[in-house]
Image: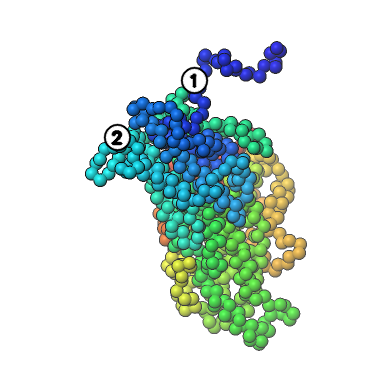
């Protein structure tokens, strides 16, 4: 035969003597030890976590052979067992313990699959893969029945007198009967973990979330207990547990396109993914049960920026909980809880004004008056879109943000037009004047918050070239400055006399926000955007000497850069069919950018370095103070960990930049958690590849 036709097939009767021993052929009834079953369940959980991370079922949970042989996992094991085998690997472990755990795994995946099938702003093939490859996920088995099977497995392991198979091997200790089974506790914890996860996903997600929060919290405690004891040892190469997984199982499944066999994630990565899901779920249902709208916004913003990103099931459950809330709760964010603008008062003021024909002469002849209810309806729509879009994957969220930015601008303009005549006619009522001034400011703040997310997410997705970095950082500096000004105006317009317009006592679905908490939140937001502005300005100052040079790839002249900026910021230009009279403060000013670049390029390099260090030092100090304000003062009382992590990552970025600008002999004060690692870079402030000239 031509050697080129050799396919590399190794005949069965002529094995390679240097190859490692092969595991025996898979047999679903082969007895396993408790430690081997624990190892199989751990690797099955790793497969489940890989599916949550976006892989196909054929590369994850379907690689577990027991999934395809549930009917074979019975008590009828034909080979007699010795006394030693009966104690170490009793044949009852397979049908009594392993089979319920496999069914529990499949049922959990079925419940997650059903959650994905609901309208949740997530997309099949983009956020998750729903293809089952004609393999059952135990859809017809009721969840209570699966939980009952897991309860029986737990009881068998605990070995009560009526359920113990080996009566002679039961040792009585007081009122507790225990089976002399090695590594029993290791296996028992994994059975209990699967039951807790199944119970958590089986409950209906709602606005309160009390029951699910308890189940996810119990699962987290069990995970801690599992990690606190030694992990099961790797089975021997000849162990039957080795044959429990077939990475190339797609060859036996109904697939549209061939799938490459992929190795499962390491067990440490699987535990980390599960820990992230449980932590996010506990936080979600804590906020759902007792969080204000501001706390919801802070939670979603922090989770959207988190690295690694949230899994699809967390985002899907978040959307379900948000949609279970009332429409009034959505409107509480920009009005009552952010700036204390009672909706009932706005409607009452506009209604009273419309009934006074004399006051209406303030409007120009023929100019239609837009009712406040129409503005509130549009505002509710874009607010719900804002909350839900934060749960999409970052590329899609960025696109959707750009689509609605002009709608936010029109709402701000229409709100100002409606309230301006009322403010003029009731100028003697200072409370009314302040309320009518605060409403457009909050809309402006929310729109610019979305713009910051839109701009900075471009760095996370590597959408900008190094030659665009200077303008992007300069533009972000201006946006942050506008946000700071808006927040300071809101704080100035806050007055205790305005509380006479307060609505009735808030309900559990709509927890209220005190004036003190609101002021503390505004202060925290001002500090946040001041730190972000300082870091962006420091990066801009560092890049100014490289503008219009070959050091930043690709080298473009200023005219070409201006054209690129115009194309990137098309969302600031009104559509042809829309008309607006309010100047969009988010529209980039290219001439101002060129003037700033020229002014800074005329300065000495030492002066620029000093300014960078001052900006970064100030930003770092502000972030350290912000990190200590985790809790009610920053509306992060239910997501303190996310807030601390967000501040810490930016502190590390400041520390890394300061070490680059300062002489090596000097030191930068840093703690263990904010020390900059070599090779690490914050997604918003990536390392720049400087081209050699």
Give the foreground label among 2 and 1. 2
The outermost residue toward the left is 174
Left or right of 455, for residue 530: left
Instruction: State the image coordinates of residue 225 (x, y, percent, origin top left).
Output: 36, 43
59 vs 362: above or below: above
Spatial CA distance of label 2 from label 1 is: 35 Å
Q: Residue at x 42, y 45 (%)?
A: 150
Query: Element at badge 1?
Result: loop
Residue 477 horizontal/vertical position (percent) = 58, 54
Front residue of this view, candidates 215 and 104: 104
**Is label 2 in a helix, a strand or a loop?**
helix
Residue 82: image tag: none
Residue labelled with disc 1: 21
Count the numbered circles shown: 2
Residue at the spot 50% in from the left edge and 35% down from the top edge: 72
Question: Within 10 angstroms of label 2, few (less than 14), some, or many (20 or more) residues?
Answer: few
User: Where is residue 538 drawn, in percent x and y?
Assistant: 54, 48
**Quadrant (top left/top right/bottom left/bottom right) for the C terminus:** top right
Please identify the quarter of the rendering in which residue 210 is found: bottom left
Q: Earlier in the sequence, mark 2 or mark 1?
A: 1
Give 189 or 240, whichever is nearer the viewer.
240
Residue 493 in view? yes
| Residue drawn at x 56%, y 61% as measured from the top left | 323
Residue underneath mark 2: 169
Task: Tell me residue 516's x, y (percent).
Answer: 42, 67
Answer few, some or many: residues within 10 Å of disc 1's Cα (few below 14, many 20 plus, some between 14 and 19).
few
Question: In which image quadrant can residue 328 be found?
Answer: bottom right
């Amino acid at each position: 035969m031509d050697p080129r036709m050799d396919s590399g097939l190794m005949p069965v009767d002529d094995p390679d003597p240097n190859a490692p021993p092969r595991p025996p052929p898979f047999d679903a009834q082969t007895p396993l030890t408790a430690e081997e079953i624990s190892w199989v369940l751990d690797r099955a959980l790793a497969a489940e976590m890989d599916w949550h991370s976006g892989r196909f079922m054929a590369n994850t949970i379907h690689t577990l052979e027991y999934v395809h042989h549930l009917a074979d996992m019975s008590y009828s094991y034909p080979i007699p067992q010795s006394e030693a085998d009966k104690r170490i690997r009793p044949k009852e472990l397979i049908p009594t313990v392993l089979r319920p755990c496999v069914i529990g795994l499949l049922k959990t995946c079925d419940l997650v699959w059903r959650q994905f099938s609901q309208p949740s702003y997530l997309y099949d093939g983009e956020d998750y893969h729903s293809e089952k490859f004609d393999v059952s996920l135990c859809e017809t088995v009721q969840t209570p029945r699966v939980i009952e099977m897991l309860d029986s497995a737990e009881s068998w392991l605990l070995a009560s007198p009526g359920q113990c198979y080996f009566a002679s091997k039961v040792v009585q200790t007081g009122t507790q009967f225990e089976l002399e089974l090695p590594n029993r506790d290791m296996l028992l914890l994994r059975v209990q973990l699967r039951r807790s996860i199944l119970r958590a996903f089986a409950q209906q997600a709602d606005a309160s979330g009390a029951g699910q929060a308890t189940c996810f919290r119990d699962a987290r405690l069990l995970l801690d207990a599992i990690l606190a004891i030694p992990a099961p040892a790797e089975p021997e190469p000849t162990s039957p547990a080795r044959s429990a997984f077939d990475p190339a199982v797609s060859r036996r499944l109904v697939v549209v396109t061939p799938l490459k066999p992929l190795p499962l994630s390491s067990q440490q990565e699987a535990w980390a993914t599960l820990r992230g899901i449980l932590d996010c779920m506990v936080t979600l249902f804590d906020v759902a049960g007792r969080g204000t709208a501001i706390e919801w916004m802070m939670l979603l913003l922090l989770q959207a920026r988190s690295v690694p990103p949230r899994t699809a099931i967390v985002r899907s459950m978040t959307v379900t909980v948000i949609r279970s809330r009332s429409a009034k709760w959505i409107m509480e964010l920009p009005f009552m809880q952010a700036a204390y603008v009672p909706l009932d008062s706005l409607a009452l003021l506009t209604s009273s004004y419309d009934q006074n024909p004399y006051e209406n002469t303030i409007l120009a002849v023929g100019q239609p008056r837009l009712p406040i209810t129409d503005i509130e309806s549009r505002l509710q729509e874009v607010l719900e879109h804002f909350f839900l879009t934060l749960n999409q994957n970052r590329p899609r969220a960025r696109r959707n943000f750009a689509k609605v930015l002009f709608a936010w601008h029109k709402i701000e303009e229409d709100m100002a037009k409606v309230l301006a005549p009322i403010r003029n006619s009731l100028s003697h009522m200072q409370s009314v004047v302040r309320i009518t001034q605060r409403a457009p400011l909050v809309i402006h703040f929310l729109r610019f918050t979305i713009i910051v997310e839109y701009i900075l997410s471009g760095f996370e997705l590597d959408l900008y070239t190094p030659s665009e970095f200077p303008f992007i950082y300069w533009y972000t500096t201006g946006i942050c400055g506008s946000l700071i000004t808006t927040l300071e105006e809101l704080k100035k317009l806050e007055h205790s006399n305005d509380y006479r317009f307060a609505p009735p006592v808030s309900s559990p679905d709509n927890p209220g926000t005190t004036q003190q908490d609101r002021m503390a939140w505004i202060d925290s937001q001002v500090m946040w955007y001041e730190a972000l502005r300082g870091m962006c300005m420091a990066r801009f100052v560092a890049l100014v000497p490289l503008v219009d040079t070959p050091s930043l790839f690709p080298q473009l002249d200023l005219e070409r850069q201006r054209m690129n900026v115009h194309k990137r910021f098309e969302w600031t230009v009104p559509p042809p069919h829309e008309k607006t009279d309010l100047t969009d403060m988010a529209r980039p000013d290219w001439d101002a950018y060129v003037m700033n670049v020229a002014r800074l390029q005329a300065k000495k390099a030492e002066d620029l370095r000093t300014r960078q260090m001052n900006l970064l030092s100030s930003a770092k100090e502000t972030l350290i103070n912000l990190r200590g304000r985790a809790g009610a003062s920053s509306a992060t009382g239910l997501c303190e960990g996310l807030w601390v992590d967000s501040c810490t990552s930016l502190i590390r970025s400041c520390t890394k930049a300061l070490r680059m600008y300062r002489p090596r002999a000097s030191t930068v004060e840093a703690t263990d958690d904010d020390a900059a690692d070599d090779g690490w870079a914050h997604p918003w402030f990536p390392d720049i590849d400087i081209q050699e000239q």
